[in-house]
Image: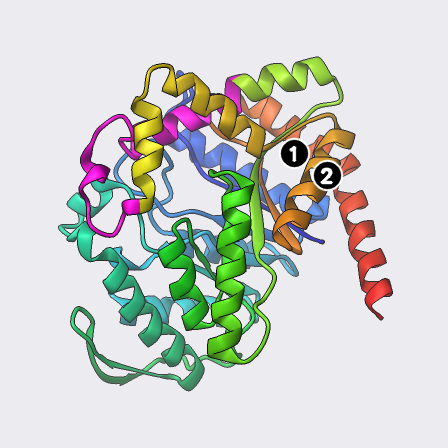
Amino acid sequence: MHVGMALIFQGRRDGVDDRAVWANELRLGDLAEPLGFESIWGVEHHFTDYTMCPDVLQYLTYFAARTKTIQLGSMVVVLPWHDPMRVAEQISMLDHMSDGRFILGMGRGLGRVEFEGFGRNQEESRAYFTEAAQMLLAGLESGVCEFDGQLVKQIRREIRPRPFKSFRGRTYAAAVSPESSAIMAKLGIGLLIIPQKPWEAVEKELTDYRRVYREVNGTEAPAPINAGWVICDEDEGRAREMAVKHIGGYWRTVIDHYEFRGEHLQSMKGYESYREIQARVNAPGGDEAMVEFFLSLQIWGTPEQCYEKILQCTQRCGADSFNAVFSYGEMDYAYAERNMRTFAKHVLPELKAYRRVETLAAE
């Protein structure tokens, strides 16, 4: 199993300013390669302290220069907030500077504060994402971008420096809704799974995605990448305490950032699958019920428990990769580093051994 880690730059710690958040998160990132993680990932968000990484490709370029072998993944570049021609150029530059270590992850976005901040029509996000992704993926293979869609217009222009390595097999998209999963299958790209819905629903959507992928591409879909928020502590009681405090606290920031306590998603075109989440949050006792539900999807406990939970999640969805988030919410950085080191010492070697056994069995 491939195991990566992600930094999200949450600015929710009392008395810790943005400068200190960035210094501490980058310090944790410097530990990723020496501790044995195989990839480092970043997210894209704007305008609030929910996460403070507005340019995930620039962030990954920093780590491209500070590392030798670790892969670099975007989780994700939100295409409706960008000119796709510029994204194509940035991706090609990063791939050159990292000697082909970049993993492309794309998405369409959900936060109303971000769409409004960029003056973008959120109800057009699915159509814009689909057109931008079509142009981007074709351009990265051919070295030339051009598109004449309803929303994306691009006259023929070369990407320079030219892409030197195919992005097939290393391109993924975050898909939460069934409609988005079908779009990803038709585009021929893999899925990033960020657990936030019942596994039964995820399994059904994956079945549909794989069926469409086979029909359109004539081959089996790539294994998805699974992500999770982690608390790895050798003391079981403390692990539960920290999970409730910090993973639960993180989920409350999700509720705030995406305005799940509001009603706007009930009528927003293209976001129908989020209506149930918003309704559940707004129901009596919904906040606490959703915190417990989110906790049930994440990875927390002793090293042995974390290992078992990761295997259960990856086996349920057929994933062959796991991305861990170790620092988030109001967690102090001393504990975040301890969390990461405990996982790296006790869980990471076991997951790598599991991967080797699976590989040998396949041979």
Q: How is the image coloured?
A: rainbow
Mark 1 → mark 2, Cα distance in angstroms: 6 Å
Q: Position of residue 56 (x, y in %)?
A: 40, 52
Q: Is residue 82 visible?
A: no
Pointer 1 with pointer 2, Cβ within 8 A:
yes
Q: Is residue 286 left or right of residue 198?
A: left
Quarter of the rendering occupied by the N terminus? bottom right
Q: Which residues are magenta?
A: 245-272
Q: Nearer the viewer, residue 311 or 335?
A: 311
Q: Is residue 11 magenta?
A: no
Q: Is residue 351 left or right of residue 255?
A: right
Q: Is residue 88 left or right of residue 250?
A: left
Q: Nearer the viewer, residue 98 or 314?
A: 314
Sort mark 2 into few (<14), some (14-19) or many (20+) by Cα contacts within 10 Å.
many
Q: Nearer the viewer, residue 98 or 191?
A: 191
**Secondary structure predominantly adopted by residues drawn in magenta:** helix
Residue that badge 2 annotates: 344
Q: Is residue 259 magenta?
A: yes
